[in-house]
């Protein structure tokens, strides 16, 4: 077995069967993806100021060729559509930049300037998109930026389209759903290191492009690797039906918390007869639990909000666009599109719950469930980004948790200890690998991946096992319709052969960290306390935040960092070991941003009462996260 083998006969046959069953006669998406094309960025490459490439859409040029046997034909089709790049006219006064990042950037022409919706991940790609728009539509100032929701691909590039100075001066509004900042910073800080590491697998950013490598992530091609940024909102949207006049453009908002993001909103342009569905209705089955990790989403409420979108806005709309993929034109077509999307999430929810109440587990339901013909035959319900398999398991997790009720699974050994016992019971690693190669030849790659994983975890230095597992992951990738599954399998194969790729994208960028509240700063630190080492410690520190006129107390005891405001409700106030007086920006810099605490104390930016050494003691209990932790090896 060699690196980058061709597709095995079983995968070739499976992909051929899929191709024969897919509705290729329905090519409406092809026309929609090309409609309104104005111009492409040429070359389709975006670089940082230091010359580093942060986006290369030209690397997907191979998608113009016929589908090879190493890619699922449905995913090949989707990737070819998503890779279309450039400036597109959606309708009069509405334009989109597509194919310059994972997400779309939409521009609405107002009376005096342009409103930007979702400015991509990186400042560099957002700036390139805005420059392309201005090249063909003239230099309009950015008068507002709208964040549809709290994921970084919908706000990270904001400093590529506006500045903090323009926002502070009132020349540019920043509009977002209520709760946006809280959820945006928590997702990228609290579990940010782990999510970013797994995102390297999910989006395949480190993989070579091509028929044996990355072809796209289903939702978009991959993530840009430029500079993420954040400017906090100046206007919160708090209620469905809220109307705002933004640069002469009337917008009616629909709140959709708990759908694709904890803080998210759709909105309607009544005068333009256009509906923005954020990321709640795109040309794929979305994730209910994204493979990089997140809070489990609620398909029941997701379906209800889509019903509300249909009832409130569909009849008053001529075009529907979203933060990914291409628009849908025509009132009847967009109504049916929304209806099928609604039915998709509602059906998965209800049928999973029905089977749960009959005693079935998540993995069992995922194997058995089938979509109704009307859903199975629509391209936009296919699992290019989410999948029926892992979404059903997410619904099970949401309602039932990790435990399937079988006592045999209540207290299993962890991965390495379990693997050693499995391998011993199976007759040793050589015997496991012998049998696994037979299963490989039979095309039973799911089983090979499971049993060879035992050998890899029992014997991490077993080169034969790692090579066979890499080949197996590759074959599973070649058959996957889901772009993120393909990327996970291929990145796993790559790391087994070459070692870890690390984390190509930053999670807690400086702008995101700067948006943390005082409460969130200490929440983030508390998550890094090495509890066992701190069991016997007892440290009380008060933090007097002068620009917010609050005193926040941290108390380390029993390995837990408790923290709270010392307001009038706190009656028991033992004296602190030390009190630090500083501003909130200085707190952020000193605790999270690399400011030298000693220098800041020496020059008066921070003043101290009490024992300054207590801070060093507290810092000694703080662990550093590992952005390079192992995934496919122990």
Image (spheres, rainbow, N blue to C red):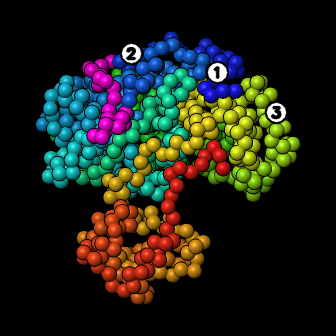
Disc 1 target residue = 7
Say how many tags the image has: 3
Q: Which residues are magenta?
A: 35-55
Residue at position x 70%, y 27% in the image: 1
**Magenta-span inclusion, residue 396:** no
Nearest-to-viewer mark from 3 and 1: 3
**In the image, is residue 544 above or below residue 10?**
below
Q: Out of 240 and 626, give the one closest to the viewer.
A: 626
How far across and down, in percent of the image, does residue 330 sit? 35, 21
Q: Earlier in the sequence, mark 2 or mark 1?
A: 1
Instruction: Residue 434: give its label.
Output: 3
Specify whether 516 is left or right of 472: left
Quarter of the view holding residue 69? top right
The earlier-in-sequence mark between 3 and 2 is 2
Dot 2 crowding, Cα within 10 Å, few <14, some 14–19, many 20+: few
Residue annotated with mark 2: 31
Residue 396 visible here? no
């Amino acid at each position: 077995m060699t690196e980058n083998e061709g597709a095995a006969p079983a995968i070739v046959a499976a992909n051929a069967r899929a191709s024969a069953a897919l509705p290729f006669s329905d090519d409406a998406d092809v026309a929609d993806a090309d409609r309104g094309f104005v111009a492409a960025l040429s070359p389709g490459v975006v670089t940082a100021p230091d010359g580093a490439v942060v986006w290369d859409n030209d690397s997907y040029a191979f998608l113009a060729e016929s589908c090879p046997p190493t890619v699922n034909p449905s995913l090949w089709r989707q990737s070819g559509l998503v890779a279309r790049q450039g400036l597109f006219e959606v309708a009069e006064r509405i334009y989109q930049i597509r194919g310059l990042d994972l997400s779309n950037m939409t521009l609405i022409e107002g009376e005096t300037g342009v409103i930007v919706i979702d400015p991509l991940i990186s400042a560099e790609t957002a700036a390139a998109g805005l420059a392309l728009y201005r090249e063909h539509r003239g230099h309009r100032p950015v008068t507002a930026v709208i964040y549809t929701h709290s994921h970084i691909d919908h706000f990270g590039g904001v400093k590529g389209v506006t500045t903090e100075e323009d926002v502070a001066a009132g020349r540019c509004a920043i509009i977002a759903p209520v709760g946006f900042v809280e959820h945006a910073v928590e997702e990228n800080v609290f579990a940010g290191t782990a999510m970013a590491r797994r995102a390297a697998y999910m989006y395949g950013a480190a993989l070579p492009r091509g028929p044996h490598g990355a072809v796209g992530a289903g939702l978009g091609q991959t993530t840009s690797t430029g500079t993420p940024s954040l400017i906090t909102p100046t206007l919160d949207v708090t209620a469905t039906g809220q109307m705002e006049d933004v640069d002469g453009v009337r917008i009616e908002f629909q709140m959709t918390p708990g759908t694709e993001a904890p803080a998210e909103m759709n909105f309607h342009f009544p005068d333009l007869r256009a509906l923005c569905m954020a990321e709640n209705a795109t040309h794929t089955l979305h994730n209910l639990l994204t493979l990089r990790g997140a809070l489990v989403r609620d398909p029941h409420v997701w379906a209800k909000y889509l019903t509300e979108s249909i009832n409130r806005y569909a009849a008053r709309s001529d075009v529907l666009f979203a933060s990914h993929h291409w628009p849908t034109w025509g009132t009847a077509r967009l109504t049916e599109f929304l209806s099928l999307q609604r039915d998709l999430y509602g059906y998965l929810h209800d049928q999973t719950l029905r089977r749960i109440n009959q005693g079935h587990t998540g993995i069992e339901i995922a194997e058995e469930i089938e979509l109704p013909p009307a859903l199975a035959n629509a391209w936009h319900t296919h699992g290019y980004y989410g999948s029926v398999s892992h979404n059903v398991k997410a619904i099970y997790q949401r309602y039932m948790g990790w435990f399937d009720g079988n006592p045999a699974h209540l207290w299993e050994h962890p991965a390495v200890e379990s693997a050693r016992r499995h391998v011993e019971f199976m007759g040793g690693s050589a015997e496991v690998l012998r049998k696994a190669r037979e299963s490989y030849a039979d095309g039973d790659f799911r089983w090979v991946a499971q049993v060879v994983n035992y050998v890899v975890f029992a014997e991490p230095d077993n080169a034969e096992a790692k090579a066979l597992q890499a080949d197996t992951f590759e074959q599973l990738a070649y058959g996957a319709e889901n772009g993120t599954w393909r990327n996970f399998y291929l990145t796993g194969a790559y790391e087994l052969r070459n070692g870890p790729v690390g984390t190509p994208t930053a999670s807690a960028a400086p702008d995101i960290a700067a948006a943390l509240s005082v409460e969130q700063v200490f929440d983030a630190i508390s998550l890094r306390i090495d509890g066992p080492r701190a069991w016997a410690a007892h440290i009380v520190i008060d933090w007097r935040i002068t620009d917010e006129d609050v005193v926040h107390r941290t108390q380390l005891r029993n390995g837990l960092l408790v923290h709270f405001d010392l307001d009038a409700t706190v009656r028991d106030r033992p004296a602190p070991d030390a009190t630090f007086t500083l501003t909130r920006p200085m707190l952020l810099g000193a605790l999270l941003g690399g400011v030298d605490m000693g220098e800041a104390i020496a020059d008066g930016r921070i003043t101290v009462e009490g024992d300054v050494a207590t801070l060093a003691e507290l810092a000694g209990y703080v662990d550093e996260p590992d952005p390079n932790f192992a995934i496919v090896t122990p």
